[in-house]
Amino acid sequence: MTTESHTESTEATTAAPTGVILTDVAATKVKALIEQEGRDDLRLRIAVQPGGCSGLRYQLFFDERSLDGDVVSDFDGVEVVVDRMSSPYLAGATIDFADRIDAQGFTIDNPNAQNSCACGDSFH
């Protein structure tokens, strides 16, 4: 049996030590937002937190802190940080940026999350 795999973005940067993939489009947007803040000490932190209908929800925010166990990856000058507790849930996840008339913002395609939003935990 042969299965086809489909990826939406062919311009994704190779998976880094964080296990997260930041596309070129998303990296450019993050750089622009950090420049707007006028600071050079900010990094994009990605975490999963309890809550939401799937049992876990994503958090993306700028952070200057370094926490024990953080895994840091560099995507064309943009540092992405994942804490050690979130890392297993985000391995292989692709962060992209959509800028369309029907949607604008960061998107996360996570192979660890199941497609449904039923009761229980949507992560393996």
Image (cartoon, rainbow, N blue to C red):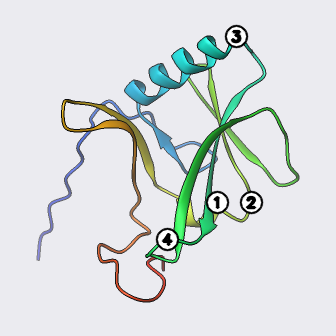
On the rendered structure, is 7 left or right of 122?
left
Cα separation between marks 3 and 4? 33 Å
Residue 82, percent across and down?
67, 50
Q: At 74% across and 15% down in the image, what residue appears?
A: 39
Q: Residue furthest bottom?
A: 119
Marks 2 and 3: which is nearer the front? 3
**Considering only order in the chain, which callout, 1 or 4, is on the residue closer to the N terminus?**
4
Label 2 sits on what residue type? Arg
Cα separation between marks 4 and 1? 19 Å
Label 4 sits on what residue type? Gly
Secondary structure state at the residue bearing disc 2: loop
Q: Disc 1 vs disc 2: Cβ atoms closer than 8 Å? A: yes
Secondary structure state at the residue bearing disc 4: loop
On the rendered structure, is 95 left or right of 30?
left
Name the residue tied to disc 3. 38
Specify the quadrant of the image occupied by residue 63.
top right
Q: Residues within 10 Å of mark 3 (few under 14, many from 20)?
A: few
Q: Residue furthest left?
A: 1
**Considering only order in the chain, which callout, 2 or 4, is on the residue closer to the N terminus?**
4
Cα separation between marks 3 and 1? 29 Å
Name the residue tied to disc 2. 84
Q: At 69% across and 31% down in the image, what residue appears?
A: 43
Name the residue tied to disc 4. 52
Cα separation between marks 1 and 2? 5 Å
